[in-house]
Amino acid sequence: KKRNPNENEFHQAVKEVFDSLIPVLVKNPHYIKQGILETIVEPERVISFRVPWVDDEGNVKVNRGFRVQYNSAIGPYKGGLRFHPSVNASIIKFLGFEQIFKNSLTGQPIGGGKGGADFDPKGKSDREIMRFCQSFMTELSKYIGPDTDVPAGDIGVGAREIGYLFGQYKKMRGGYEAGVLTGKGIGYGGSLARKEATGYGTVYFVEEMLQDQNLSFKGRTVVVSGSGNVSIYAMEKAAQLGAKVVACSDSNGYIYDKKGINLETVKRIKEVEKKRISAYVTDHPEAIYTENCLGIWSVPCDIALPCATQNEIDSASAEMLVSNGVKAVGEGANMPSTLEAVEIFLENNVLFAPAKAANAGGVSVSALEMSQNSSRLSWTFEEVDSKLQAIMKNIYQNSKEAAREYGAPGNFVVGANIAGFVKVADAMIEQGVI
Ligand code: NDP
């Protein structure tokens, strides 16, 4: 904390991982002797840069851009870009740190990284978004490449932004390097099922966890926070598996539709019209809209899927979910539950799927996009989706096995952190002190 003051989210992420690693360190003290903890917590490189751009009225605006190249022990840095006014060094470092272990868990050769800017895309015109992306990439292009660092989307960065970023990268580098970004449009190197991958993957992971207890999504009531990329496709897959999704949100408020959320309406509002979720009630007057997005956790449900942002479930919300009888919580967003909330879920025997494992489907399909780009092939939706399902099953089994081996059976927080850590730590040791 002395070395990284005011980086609360980063401290929270490191504490969660390091607490889980205690049994591994006791059994394998060489990790301590080799200085792995001190090394892994320090990014290999942090890039911070100015992003000047001109708005539609001709005013010059300046934002701050970041790329944290955290760890390349097992592959090129890989992780999304976030455009949101809350972005700062702490947020990008927490996300980058988490990404190291998540990417290791996928079983694919990808290191950890993350980036973004404190730019607010809300209310900006399409031209303003394009100019911002071009300015951001003019600088970022010096540091990334298909074999060094491969960014993707995250909050505020979807297919449109990736398109503008890719166009500018191409212009700066003077060549077509398809594998430099993932989440691209299908017409120019994107992978089918990438858009769906994080949300679908979260539901696949939770379904594995439920089935181990002879439960399933079928007939269950589900609440999903957010209404962005992860949330929409988590809702879609949960409904396909027979659940009824009754609530979703955005940063202003949440909607409750006791008949079940109409996903076509949500997709139109959020993906096409880019309006607020409150617009849902115009088409569905029986639904109820409530201001204050955090109130969503008061809606009774069997399964809760937080898919919006970090620390959106605090201890009070966790208590409320437990007292309403929640059976499982699956984290689609990164670190949506505070450390105290996680404790409450575990103490009350709620099946808990932590982000690192449960939302790894997105980066997994990003790695499959890189494979398709390298081989100049495009796989069908079904091929990619079945690989995604196999990867999520594998992550589930590996996390479960690691938790059992280190004396915490059923604790996927511990299992995912350990399974992700060991592979990276061993690779770091084999590559020497660098
Ligand atoms: P989007 O920008 O598509 O959607 C984000 C959603 O969360 C929106 O509904 C947004 O509401 C809401 N939200 C954002 N910030 C806040 C906030 N501070 N408080 C309340 N609600 C908020 O992002 P994604 O769906 O891509 O990402 C969601 C989460 O999933 C993030 O934690 C991200 O890191 C994580 N994730 C994403 C992956 C991906 O493949 N996209 C992969 C793995 C993890 P509003 O529109 O009002 O801002």
Image (spheres, grey):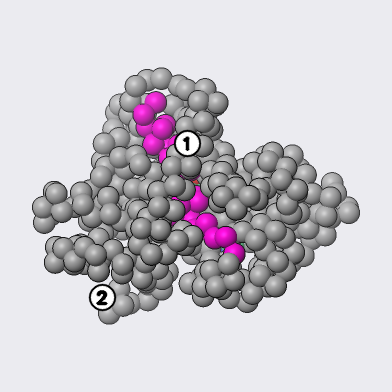
Is the stretch drawn in magenta largely helix, strand or loop? helix
Quadrant of the displayed image that contains ligand 1: bottom right
Is 105 situated above or below 349? above
Q: Quadrant of residue 122?
A: bottom right
State the residue at coordinates (38%, 64%).
407
Query: Could you say which is closer to the camera, residue 83 or residue 240?
Result: 240
Query: Could you say which is closer to the camera, residue 168 or residue 386?
Result: 386
Instruction: Please tell me whether residue 367 belongs to the stretch shown in magenta.
Output: yes
State the residue at coordinates (27%, 79%).
2
| Residue 273 seen from this side | no
Query: What x and y, as percent, mark residue 374?
Result: 33, 25
State yes or no: discs 2 and 1 in contact (Cβ < 8 Å): no
Cα gap from disc 2 to disc 1, whole angstroms: 41 Å
What SS does tag 1 mark? helix
> Total label count?
2
Query: Could you say which is closer to the camera, residue 193 or residue 417?
Result: 417
Relative horizontal placement of residue 188, taking residue 424 as reference (left or right): right
Relative horizontal placement of residue 352, taking residue 220 as reference (left or right): left
Counting residues from the start of the chain, the first of labels 2 and 1 encountered is 2
What SS does tag 2 mark? loop
State the residue at coordinates (36%, 58%).
405
Q: Please, which residue is most extreme toward the bottom here? A: 2
Query: What x and y, as percent, mark residue 156?
Result: 53, 50
| Residue 259 seen from this side | yes
State the residue at coordinates (72%, 60%).
301
Residue type beneath disc 2? Arg
Write down the residue under mark 1.
Answer: 390
Q: State the extent of the magenta-drawn residues as a range.
A: 350-372
Q: Quadrant of the N terminus?
A: bottom left
Write down the residue under mark 2.
Answer: 3
Residue type beneath disc 1? Ala
Q: Residues within 10 Å of mark 1 (few under 14, many from 20)?
A: some
